[in-house]
Image: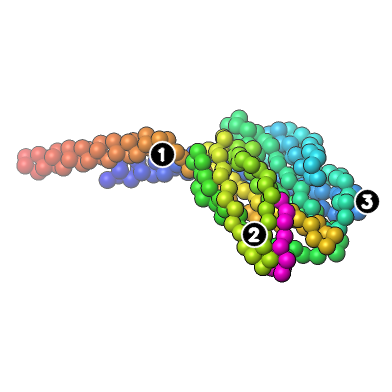
Amino acid sequence: MAVHRAAIALLLGAAVAGQAAAQLRLEAESQVGDVVTLRLRATNAAAEAVHDVVPEVVYRHRTVAAERVAAIAPGAAHEWRTALPAPPGPGTFPATIRLRYTARDGQARSELLVHLVRTPGAPPSDVRATLAAEPVSRLGHAAVTLENATPEGVAGRLVVALPFDLRTDPESRPAEVAASGRISLPVVVQNVAARPGDHRPVFALFEYDRDGTHHAVVAEAMLSVIARSGDRRPLVVGLAALAVALSILAIAWRRARARRAAR
């Protein structure tokens, strides 16, 4: 039994270690004036350093790359300040932030955040967005629900933002919600390079104009990456072989004990 417990503990330890990965917690704040001052902060919440950290900001169809940071130590943080053009009018405007970095194992990784730049006094949106996502292996499915609380229809554009290791097609599509209505839009997510055990953020962004104000509504979900059925088979076979081996050891141990007792 001691051998059995040790083997199971080893397997569990290997599974936990396999799922552990360096992660950066990404935060953003913005101030609107003659320009938009965007402050980004990346905190290394893992027990290992990350390297070659570069933020990229997509804002009003422009991509801005901030300075590269050679490394962020465990528990440390780094801040960037980036100037963006002022919004063209009142409302909320999305800034999609992707943070590229290299983990300890040499693998390229990324984090994702959608931040809303809000002009002073911008009214709240009358449309509510929610996002539900299923686990993904090679392909996964999600659904975006839009609810319109106004007595008039709303037409806009839905954008799905994903980390670099996931993909969807199309990323952007027109969407219309009837007066006091609700719609649900399916999303297919393709796994490009995410690894089993990863938990990846997914953002759904709905933009529309109403009464001279631009509105951006964001919903977020966390998508779990699981192994494909073919990838899980070796582990199942290995566990079965381990169970057989432990059974044989137990039988042999009982027989040896019985022989000693007979003497």
Q: Earlier in the sequence, mark 3 or mark 2?
A: 3
**Is the residue under label 3 in contact with that under label 1 (CB below 8 Å)?**
no
Q: Secondary structure at mark 1?
A: helix
Q: Which residue is mark 1?
A: 229
Q: Which residue is mark 3?
A: 34
In the image, the segment drawn in magenta is 149-157
Above or below residue 167? Residue 177 is below
Q: Position of residue 199 (x, y in %)?
A: 56, 46
Q: Amino acid at mark 2?
A: Leu
Instruction: Let me know if residue 122 appears in the view.
Output: no
Name the quadrant of the C terminus: top left
Determine the image quadrant of residue 230.
Answer: top left
Q: Amino acid at mark 1?
A: Ser
**Is the residue under label 2 in contact with that under label 1 (CB below 8 Å)?**
no
Numbered tag placed on residue 146 in the rendering: 2
Q: Secondary structure at mark 2?
A: strand
Q: Residue furthest left?
A: 262
**Is the residue under label 2 in contact with that under label 3 (CB below 8 Å)?**
no
Determine the image quadrant of residue 61.
Answer: top right
Q: Amino acid at mark 3?
A: Asp
User: Which marked residue is nearer to the observer: mark 3 or mark 2?
Assistant: 2
Determine the image quadrant of residue 98.
Answer: top right
Report crowding for label 1: few under 14, some 14 to 19, many 20 or more residues within 10 A (C-alpha).
few
